[in-house]
Image (spheres, coloured by chain):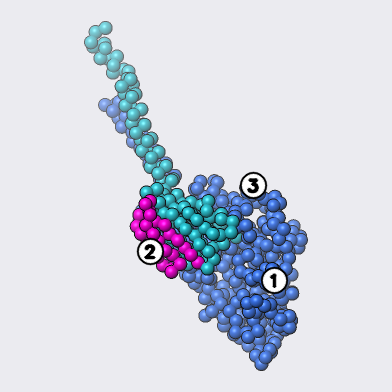
Chain colours: A cyan, B blue
Amino acid sequence: MSLKKISEEKQNKFFRKKDLIIYILVAVVIAAVFLAVFFSEDNDAPEGIRIIYADEVIFTMTIGEEGTILSDVVTREKTYFGYRITVATEYGSNVFDVNVKEKTVSVESADCEGGDCRHMKISKKSDSIVCLPHLLRVECTDGVNRPVSG
Amino acid sequence: MKKFLVILATILLSATLCLGALVSCSGKKGKQYTTTAYFGTQTVMAIFDDFIRNEDTEKAEKVWQEVKAVFASVESSVGRENSVLADFNALEAGETMETDVHFYNLLKLSAKIYDQTDGAFNPAVAPLVELWGFLPSDMPFARKDGELPSQEYIDKFLPLTDFSEIEFSEEDGKYYVTKPLASVTIEGKTYTSELDFSGIGKGYAAGLAAEVMKEAGYVYGYVSAGSSSLVLLKNNSDDYGSGENWYVDLVHPTRQDIYARLEKNSVSVSTSGDYENNFLYEGKTYSHIIDGKSGKPFDNDMRCVTVVCDDPASGDAYSTAFCVMGEEKTLEFLKNHPELEAIFVTGKDVLQVYNGVGAVITASDITEK
């Protein structure tokens, strides 16, 4: 086959192997960027929380900062992982752990009847912690809570 | 050159598709606004929209201001103090006054549901609610801790609670209400009929707020006034529901756990019961919901009722009425009202579900406990 013919052959072949690899690489990179952005949006960690007692905000915090205590029923102490927030009202006591690194809030202890809140945790903006016997709620300041009724 | 153009076109197309997908999927972010300024409870407005540009957030904040203005306007009408309602309650028997449109609308709706429920929903029980100590009162004989009000006073106040005696009208765009002639004098003080719209006012305000959201073009979100009055638009996030339905968790009145989950959109969800405002006397729970016939807190097996329907004000009123009516009468009523769905928990901790128009209940424990 003459060089001229080879050159013509190459021109006629629309996709060569190397071309295909480049196309696939470009597609993979775009897909990876898309997936990374999409899933990071979906699992958004909370940026801030507020604690509400009997419909009054008693504590607010941007996770990573020490937060603002708005009522005498709240006390706060620094821990290895973040902060321990204690709410002691006439109805009882709840202790919340704020993990700054993981951006989570969990219930360390609660003396409410039933203790349902002890299983609740905030790790996404849509999460909340509710302790109805103690009229307490922990919500994300930058998220939306699920609607409840009752 | 031709090949280069094809590659370029491929890359641009892929990027455009991905960008489009990103905007349509993750662009719908939720924003929540809350306040405790109205009706002594927490008002929440949640919106899901494309919060990409600053204008999107500015628009949502403007709508929130309008929603707050709606709640303020309704509270200035039917709130307990410094309101049209307070002016009405202060009238002498037989006097007429001009009201605002909210007061008139609630009178009209209350009259309809009062008739439908044979007086089970009755905003005119206000004097008895005061007597039982569930509203601030200057009655020297109102219930105090550790006692029940005297039957003598209950009997004296009962004639003041006939809601059908309240006259109201609209003339040339103005609204009027006339207080009934009935009055009772106790220990030198004369008492007249009074109204209390706490069983319907929050739902009414939430309904108006949802209209404000819709008029602003929002499709996805919800608004609530406390946990008793909730108005759902549509949902668009898997975190909160399925498809366009929201998951609405119903909290059990005594166990305090979630006993059922509704999957709903574009409806209102209203809950009433004996659990939220009550007192305990000799082992018995007395609720703030007063039966206008007995003059006492409702006394039957109902613990809490959730009503799903189109109109949140009506839902609030029906859920209150069903508590008074009890299980048997409520089921009979619902047979004739397929537009209403109701779920209730009775004293025996039995959950009853009435699927008037096909409610979806996904909780695993909806059978007898």
Instruction: Please name whichever residue, B80 or B250, is drawn nearer the observer in this view of the structure.
Output: B250
Residue matched to label 2: A68
Whole-percent x, y for residue B66 in the image: 46, 66
Disc nearer the start of the sequence (1/3): 1
Chain letter of mark 2 equals A
Question: Which subunit holds the residue at mark 1?
Answer: B
Q: Write the start and end of the magenta stretch as one range.
A: A64-89
Q: Residues within 10 Å of mark 1 (few under 14, many from 20)?
A: few
Image marks 2 and 1: residues in contact by CB distance under 8 Å = no
Q: Quadrant of the C terminus of chain A?
A: bottom right
Residue B285 percent coordinates (x, y): 67, 68
| Residue A82 forms part of the magenta stretch | yes
Q: CA distance from mark 2 to mark 1?
A: 42 Å
Say which residue appears at 51% left-offset and 52% top-offset. Answer: A120
Q: In this view of the protein, which residue sits in the foreground, A72 or B167?
A: A72
Q: Quadrant of residue A28?
A: top left
Q: Residue at x 56, y 55 (%)?
A: A115
The answer to whether residue B81 is above or below residue B363 is below
Chain letter for mark 3 = B
* A117 left or right of A41 in image: right
Determine the CA span between mark 3 and mark 2.
Answer: 40 Å
Mark 3 highlights which residue? B364
Residue B9, image quadrant: top left
Note whether B278 is above or below B28 in the view shown.
Answer: below
Residue B282 is labelled as 1
Inter-mark Cα distance, 1 to 3: 35 Å
In the structure shown, which secondary structural element does the residue marked by tag 2 occupy?
A: strand
Tell whether position B97 is magenta.
no
Indicate the secondary structure of the residue bearing disc 1: loop
Which amino acid type is shown beneath numbered disc 2?
A: Thr
